[in-house]
Each structure stands twice: as structure tokens, then as C-alpha cells.
């Protein structure tokens, strides 16, 4: 899997290669903490064949390639 950060200019870069849901969450939280951002919620949905994460920024998002929405939201994974 590839976890991608998209900045406010639409530029994307890979920030991690997690192997499970817990690592995805950990890497997103680590990234936003390192950039002095506080997230009060996370919304996730599938868009164009990858997961899109909204963590409260108006213009910056995270994307996950290699896992479906059903896999991500399944209990115990």
C-alpha cells in the first residue's frame, strides 16, 4: 500500500508504505503532528479507485492506494 499526501496545490507525494489499517492511522497522525496540525475528525471514502482521507483541512488530503473502503472499514483489520 502507498499512503500519499496531497498539498493545497494538488501536488502529491508518498509519505509511507503501511501494511495494515493501524499503520495507516499511525502514519497520518504522525504526519499531521509533525506539521503542527490538530485534527478533530477523520472522514474516509473511496474516490477514483483509492481511499481519500479528510482530516479537517480545507485543501489538503491523504490518499491510500492498495486497500478498498470495505477492507478499511471491516472490523478487526
Image (tube, helix red, strand yellow):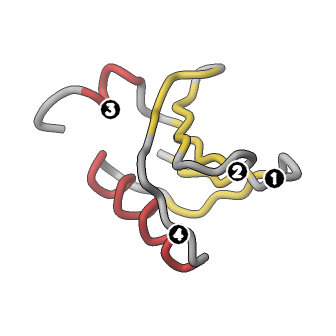
Vertical arrangement, residue 68 with respect to residue 44, above or below: above
Q: Given this view, does label 1 or label 4 mark the residue nearer the observer?
A: 1
Q: For label 4, count other residues whose C-alpha is less than 10 Å away and answer few (under 14), some (14-19) or many (20+).
A: some
Vertical arrangement, residue 74 with respect to residue 10, above or below: above
Q: Is residue 72 left or right of residue 16?
A: left
Seen as rendered, the residue at the extreme front is: 40
How far across and how far down the image is residue 35, in percent? Answer: 60, 76
Q: Point out the tag, 1 or 3, that comes first from the N-terminus.
A: 1
Q: Is residue 52 left or right of residue 40?
A: right
On residue 72, which mark appears? 3
Q: For label 1, count other residues whose C-alpha is less than 10 Å away and answer few (under 14), some (14-19) or many (20+).
A: few
On residue 60, which mark appears? 2
Question: Marks 2 and 1: in contact by CB < 8 Å?
Answer: yes
Q: Which residue is mark 4?
A: 31
Vertical arrangement, residue 47 with respect to residue 7, above or below: above
Measure how far apart labels 3 and 2 are at the Cα level.
Answer: 21 Å
Amino acid at each position: 500500500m502507498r499512503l500519499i499526501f496531497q498539498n493545497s496545490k494538488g501536488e502529491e507525494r508518498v509519505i509511507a508504505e503501511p501494511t495494515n489499517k493501524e499503520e495507516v492511522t499511525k502514519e497520518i497522525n504522525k504526519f499531521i503532528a509533525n506539521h503542527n496540525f490538530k485534527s478533530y475528525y477523520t472522514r474516509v471514502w473511496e474516490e477514483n479507485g483509492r481511499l481519500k482521507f479528510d482530516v479537517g483541512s480545507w485543501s489538503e488530503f491523504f490518499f491510500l492506494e492498495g486497500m478498498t473502503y470495505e477492507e478499511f472499514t471491516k472490523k478487526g483489520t
